[in-house]
Image (tube, rainbow, N blue to C red):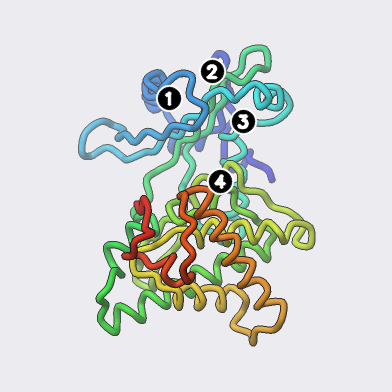
Amino acid sequence: MALSSKYRLLRERKWKLLVQPAQWSRELWEEVLRQSAGAARGEIHPETKQFRYPRGEKGREYYLKIYHRSHPFGTIKDLFRQSKSFRALKQGLALAEHGFHVPFAVAAGEERDCRLLKRAFLLTARIDGSSIPLYLREHHAVPLSLPALREKRESLKKLALEIGRLHRMGFVHGDLVPSNIFVRTEEKGVSFFYMDNDRTRRYPVWLFQRLWMRNLVQLNRFVLPGVSRQDRMRFLKSYLGDKTWGRKERRLVRQLEKRTRERRLECDRIAAQVSFRELMRWDGPFTRNIQ
């Protein structure tokens, strides 16, 4: 995909930048450098900073995701590939071109010394919304009125249909956990924004269908406020197209439950021999780290 019509390529010493011309300025670049200079050194995982520019209450809110130097093997691979910041920018554009919502990327940059990637960043504008766990906690925690219950089910169905379309288009999100999907409330309902797209890929639809299951497990393994087992089944039914389930669909349900249990054991150290309903009950004894 051509970036030239949307982003301008700039060089700043050892930095290579892709910037949105209408949103970029020398002053904003200097602020990005200041924020980057204060980032933790030696960290492997990316770091995200929130700031306003211009400074003060009237300034626009930005999120700066800073990618540090990779581990030794990753450093070698980085010699022959683009940085995660550039990959995130391009995958975000690819998703947007197919009608999916992503944060507006103002700029991406990578700093190299003799081709060695030292650090990179992605600068995005703030989304007026909240992550799925926070949205559910604020709007759909029980007890619910009948209109609120209908709204919750409609929102879950919309999300299921959208993720189904995402997969049918060949996209596989790198980390489709609930906190990486933001919800924005609008007059016609809700819109969903996909965050952290540096590991999102698009494959031929027939090639990597097994990775769709990974996305479903990433979503399913978290206990969420107000989301019951019935809600999870409704989600899956909409994801599969509201068709009558046959042997293939029932096998998928069993595999999803099995892998969800495995991930809860691996990530949360929970190996409870209880029903899936009890294991995933949001106000039950096995709730962990809901944000």
Residue farthest bottom in this picture? 244
Q: Is residue 43 visible?
A: yes
Specify the quadrant of the image occupied by residue 131: bottom left
Q: CA distance from mark 2 to mark 1?
A: 10 Å
Callout 2 amino acid: Glu
Of residues 174 and 14, which is closer to you in this image? 174
The numbered dot on residue 12 is 2
Q: Position of residue 80 (x, y in %)?
A: 74, 26
User: In the image, 164: left or right of 45?
Assistant: right
Q: Earlier in the sequence, mark 3 or mark 4?
A: 3
How far is mark 3 from mark 4, CA to CA? 12 Å
| N-terminal label among 4 and 2 | 2
Label 2 neighbourhood size at 10 Å, few (<14), some (14-19), many (20+)? few
The disc at residue 197 is 4
Q: Residue at x 20, y 38 (%)?
A: 57
The answer to whether mark 2 and mark 1 are in CB contact below 8 A is: yes
- Residue where numbered disc 3 is placed: 83
Disc with the residue nearer the chain's start (2 vs 3): 2
The residue carrying mark 1 is: 29
Q: Amino acid at mark 1?
A: Trp
Q: Secondary structure at mark 3?
A: loop
Disc 2 element: strand
Q: Residues within 10 Å of mark 3 (few under 14, many from 20)?
A: many
- Report crowding for label 1: few under 14, some 14 to 19, many 20 or more residues within 10 A (C-alpha): some
| Amino acid found under the numbered disc labelled 3 | Ser
Q: Quadrant of residue 167?
A: bottom right
